[in-house]
Amino acid sequence: MGLLPKLRTGNGGAGAAAAPAHANGENLRPSNGLKEFLGHLGMPDNARVLDLGPVSQATVDFFTGQRYRIYSEDLLRAWQDFLAAELAALMAAGVGEKKEAERPAPSERASRFLDAQLDYPEESFHGVLAWDLIDYLPPELVQLLVARLHRLVRPGGAALAIFHNRIPERFHRYRVLNAAAVEYLPCAAPVPYGRVLPNREILNLFSKFRSSKSFVGRDQIREVLFTR
């Protein structure tokens, strides 16, 4: 898979950055992390942004309205589908619980998933929106994913991630409405919640990035911007 097949295109000028009229004010959240993220992107024509959440037309419209190219990979949904397909293949091959030794190692499975799902050249993106997917993925996949993101982000680029300080009551998908606000939409979680990561572990995971900046909200949500 290359870059172009995953490109989400759109038209519009600066007006595309405005919040849609149908946005639900109760789900809106000011985002200092997003403001910092956009500041790192700057305004180069055709700058590339990778969105690792569910495809959102509002997000696509915002970034294309700013003359960015946005690429979408619903990583949590893809991981769910990948696990289901692998389980079906193992069952068809007769590899059940009693043949645990024949199952692939978790790290090998995670590597195959990322190779298939994030098949992009190094330094392809000026920025990555990771949202809160790291809180939901298993440790063996998280470590490989963060290393992959470091390779995909260009020097001077940034990755924006969200972390929960406590177990969330609901899973949310995210929509970028304007340069300073994100809409949080409750929906069914594609995979179970993983765990709350302490700040030190987060910083260790992203230690290859040059710097980080955190924004903690009253809702127990941390936005962290990691700069390459």
Image (cartoon, rainbow, N blue to C red):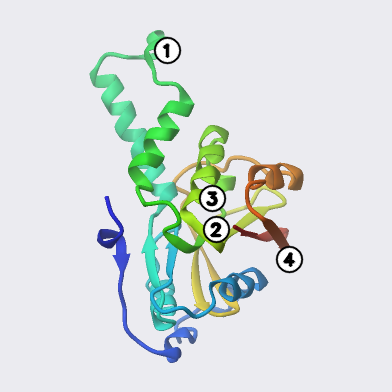
Mark 3 Cα within 10 Å, few/some/many (few <14, many 20+)?
Answer: many
Looking at the image, which is closer to me, 186 or 71?
Answer: 71
List x then y, in percent, for residue 98: 40, 8
Measured Cα–Cα span from mark 4 to mark 2: 15 Å
Would you say the residues marked 4 and 2 are in contact, meaning their CB atoms lie under 8 Å apart? no
Residue on which disc 1 sits = 100
Residue 172 visible to an observer of this rendering: no
Measured Cα–Cα span from mark 1 to mark 2: 33 Å
Closer to viewer: mark 3 or mark 4:
3
Q: Quadrant of residue 21?
A: bottom left
Q: Residue at x 51, y 38 (%)?
A: 144
Q: Earlier in the sequence, mark 1 or mark 4?
A: 1
Name which residue type carries label 2.
Trp
List x then y, in percent, for residue 153: 50, 57
Name which residue type carries label 1.
Glu
Q: Residue at x 71, y 47 (%)?
A: 203
Q: Which mark is residue 150?
A: 3
Relative to residue 139, is residue 190 drawn left or right?
A: left
Would you say the residues marked 1 and 2 are in contact, meaning their CB atoms lie under 8 Å apart? no
Name which residue type carries label 3.
His
Mark 4 Cα within 10 Å, few/some/many (few <14, many 20+)?
Answer: some
Would you say the residues marked 3 and 1 are in contact, meaning their CB atoms lie under 8 Å apart? no
Q: Residue at x 76, y 65 (%)?
A: 218
List x then y, in percent, for residue 220: 73, 58
Q: Earlier in the sequence, mark 3 or mark 1?
A: 1
